[in-house]
Structure formats: C-alpha cells, structure tokens
Image: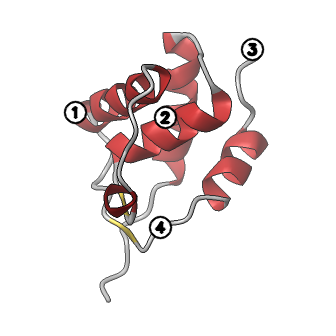
Amino acid sequence: MPTPTHQAIDEAFAALVYDRDERKAPDAHRSSKFRVGWAAALEGKVYEPEKLERLTWLNLGYRLSQHFGALTPEQIDVVYDDLAASWREPCAA
C-alpha cells in the first residue's frame, strides 16, 4: 500500500468519533504507544467502546490501523509524524 498522504491522514482523523482528546504532547513514548495500538488492530484485538470515548495516542494508532491497514514501520512513522506536527494542546473544558 502506498504511504498515506497528508490529506488522507487528515480525512481519516476528521472522521474519528470520540468525546475528548486526551493526547499528550508527541514524543518518543507516545510514538511507541501509537505503534502498539496500530499492531493491536492488525492482531485483531477489539477495543471496548468506552476505551474509544477518549482519544489517546494508543487508540489513535489502533483506529488508523483499522482505516489504513498494514503499513511498513516507515509508513506508520509518516502517519504519526504528520499527526504529531498538527497536534495542539486540547482546550480545557
């Protein structure tokens, strides 16, 4: 599969349904969590709806893996890096 474009990543992100964005600032630890979530979806794990009410880097990887499917580690890095570049601190409620 070709590497997802910025537009494809933005569209996939915009289609997500969640109650609150609890992602912390992107860093190496969060990149790792994103990859763990990505792998979980490919392994057929199912996240409970309650877990998907809040957006985390882990379940963002899970959700986008369901959307884009199996990608190379380099392609997954492109997806993460694109999302990390557009990350903004969530507004307090």
For the N terminus, the image quarter is: top right
Q: Are marks 2 and 1 in contact (CB under 8 Å)?
A: no
Instruction: Say left or right for 39 vs 51.
Output: right
Look at mark 4 in the image and give the residue it sits on. Answer: 18
Query: 32 and 62: which one is in front?
Result: 62
Look at the numbered disc 3 and give the secondary structure of its residue.
loop
Q: Disc 3 and disc 1: Cα gap in Å?
A: 26 Å
Q: Residue at x 58, y 35 (%)?
A: 66
Q: Quadrant of residue 52?
A: bottom left
How far across and how far down the image is residue 93, in percent?
Answer: 32, 89
Badge 3 local density, few (<14 within 10 Å), some, or many (20+)? Answer: few
Q: Measure the C-alpha gap from mark 3 to mark 4.
A: 27 Å
Mark 2 or mark 1, earlier in chain: 1
Q: Helix, strand or loop at disc 4?
A: loop
**To which residue does mark 2 refer?**
80
Looking at the rendered structure, the kind of residue marked 1 is: His
Query: Marks 3 and 2: in contact by CB < 8 Å?
Result: no
Q: CA distance from mark 2 to mark 3?
A: 17 Å
Q: Quadrant of residue 31?
A: top left
Q: Are marks 3 and 4 in contact (CB under 8 Å)?
A: no
45 relative to 17 in the view: left or right = left
Q: Which residue is mark 1?
A: 29
**Residue that label 3 marks:** 1
Which of marks 2 and 4 precedes in the sequence? 4
Question: Reading the chain from its start, which is encountered first: label 3 or label 4?
Answer: 3
Label 1 crowding class (10 Å Cα cut-off): few <14, some 14-19, many 20+? few
Give the alpha-carbon distance from disc 1 to disc 4, as whole Å.
Answer: 22 Å
Which residue is rendered at x = 46% and y = 55% of the image? 87
Residue at x 37% of width, y 33% of height: 37
Q: Percent x, y for residue 60?
A: 45, 45
- Inspect the image, locate mark 4, and give the three-letter code of the amino acid beneath it: Tyr
Q: Are marks 4 and 2 in contact (CB under 8 Å)?
A: no
